[in-house]
Amino acid sequence: MAIEGLELHHGQIEEVTAMLKDLSHQMEDTMEQTATFLTQGLGHELKGDLAVGASDFAQLLHSADEEMKTDIARAAAALEVMHGLLRDADANGGNLMRNY
């Protein structure tokens, strides 16, 4: 007995995991560029409360960046573990169906 149309697309899961990592790096770069602009570029032109606000926001970006990297790394690792489990289940299911 065969189950038609049942297929797990492992390549798509691998692609999504790679995209998640790539987009994470792009977000990190953008946040770093923004923080640098606030503190070194625009920061030299701002005075008083605006300078303090720009500096505070740059520090917030740095903190958020570290949290984001940790969260995305955990998410990518979880996807990889889930994919391994799905790959194993797919192989075991295929073996069971061949032996049925």
Image: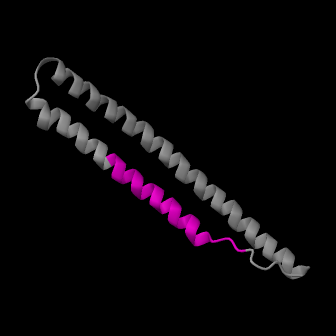
Q: Is residue 23 magenta?
A: yes
Q: Magenta span covers which residues? A: 7-28
Q: Is residue 89 magenta?
A: no
Q: Give whichever of 92, 28 is nearer the camera.
A: 28
Location of residue 29 with respect to 61 vertically, above or below: below
Q: Position of residue 40 (x, y in %)?
A: 14, 36
Query: Residue 61 falls in which quadrant of the image?
Result: top left
Give x and y (percent) for residue 31.
Answer: 30, 42
Q: Main secondary structure of the magenta part?
A: helix
Task: Measuring from the top left, give residue 41's x and y in whole percent.
Answer: 12, 38
Would you place residue 65 above or below residue 19 in this image? Answer: above
Q: Is residue 11 left or right of residue 93?
A: left
- Residue at 13% over, 35% down: 42
Quadrant of the frame with the C terminus? bottom right
Residue at 56%, 68% (x, y): give it.
12
Residue visible at 29% across and 47% down in the picture: 30
Q: Is residue 65 left or right of residue 57?
A: right
Q: Taking 21 as reference, is 91 above or below it?
A: below
Nearest the viewer among 9 and 87 is 9
